[in-house]
Image (spheres, helix red, strand yellow):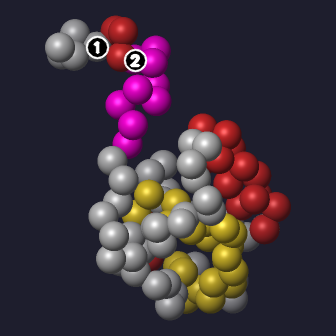
C-alpha cells in the first residue's frame, strides 16, 4: 500500500485504532483506511456522536502499512466523555 486515509480533527489529533483521539506520535496507533469512503463513513459516525467535531479525511503516505509524515499535534488530547456510554454508567458499582 502506498497510501492510506486517516481522520484528523480540528485540534490536529488523529482517530486511533483504540477508538479515541491520538496525537499521531506513534503511527501504529493511528487508524488507517484503504478506501476514502470507509474513512468518510467513520467520520460521519463520529460527527453524529460529537456535534462539535470538525474533522477531515486526509490521504497520507505509508511505509510498512503505517502512516508516515503525520503532523503531530501540540494540543492535549481530549479525554473521553464519561456520559457518552449511559448504559454502563448505571451498572457501574464503582461510580459515586
Q: Residue at x 38, y 70 (%)?
A: 23
Q: Position of residue 49 (x, y in %)?
A: 60, 38
Indicate whether residue 17 is drawn in magenta.
no
The answer to whether mark 1 and mark 2 are in CB contact below 8 A is: yes
- Left or right: residue 93 versus residue 59 is left
Q: Residue at x 22, y 10 (%)?
A: 93
- The magenta region covers 80-88
Q: Residues within 10 Å of mark 2 (few under 14, many from 20)?
A: few
User: Circle 2 sits in a helix, a strand or a loop, which is it?
Assistant: helix
Check the image and name the residue furthest to the right: 37
Q: Position of residue 81 (x, y in %)?
A: 39, 37
Q: Quadrant of residue 9 in the image?
A: bottom right
Say which residue label 1 marks. 92
Magenta span: chief secondary structure: helix
Q: Nearer the viewer, residue 64 or 94?
A: 94
Q: Residue at x 46, y 25 (%)?
A: 85
Up/down of 66 relative to 96, above or below: below
Q: Nearer the viewer, residue 65 or 52?
A: 52
Q: Residues within 10 Å of mark 1 (few under 14, many from 20)?
A: few
Indicate whether residue 85 is drawn in magenta.
yes
Say which residue label 2 marks. 88
User: Circle 1 sits in a helix, a strand or a loop, which is it?
Assistant: loop
Tell me the distance, in whole angstroms, between the alpha carbons under discs 1 and 2. Answer: 6 Å
Q: Nearer the viewer, residue 49 or 3?
A: 49
Q: Nearer the viewer, residue 95 or 33?
A: 95
Q: Residue at x 36, y 16 (%)?
A: 89
- Left or right: residue 20 versus residue 94 is right
Q: Position of residue 15 (x, y in %)?
A: 52, 60
Say if residue 32 shows up in the picture: no
Amino acid at each position: 500500500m502506498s497510501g492510506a486515509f486517516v481522520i484528523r480533527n480540528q485540534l490536529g489529533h488523529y482517530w486511533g485504532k483504540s477508538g479515541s483521539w491520538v496525537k499521531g506520535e506513534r503511527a501504529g496507533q493511528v487508524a488507517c483506511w484503504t478506501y476514502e469512503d470507509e474513512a468518510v463513513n467513520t467520520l460521519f459516525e463520529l460527527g453524529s456522536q460529537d456535534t462539535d467535531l470538525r474533522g477531515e479525511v486526509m490521504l497520507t503516505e505509508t511505509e510498512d502499512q503505517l502512516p508516515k509524515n503525520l503532523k503531530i499535534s501540540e494540543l492535549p488530547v481530549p479525554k473521553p466523555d464519561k456520559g457518552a456510554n449511559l448504559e454502563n454508567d448505571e451498572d457501574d458499582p464503582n461510580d459515586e
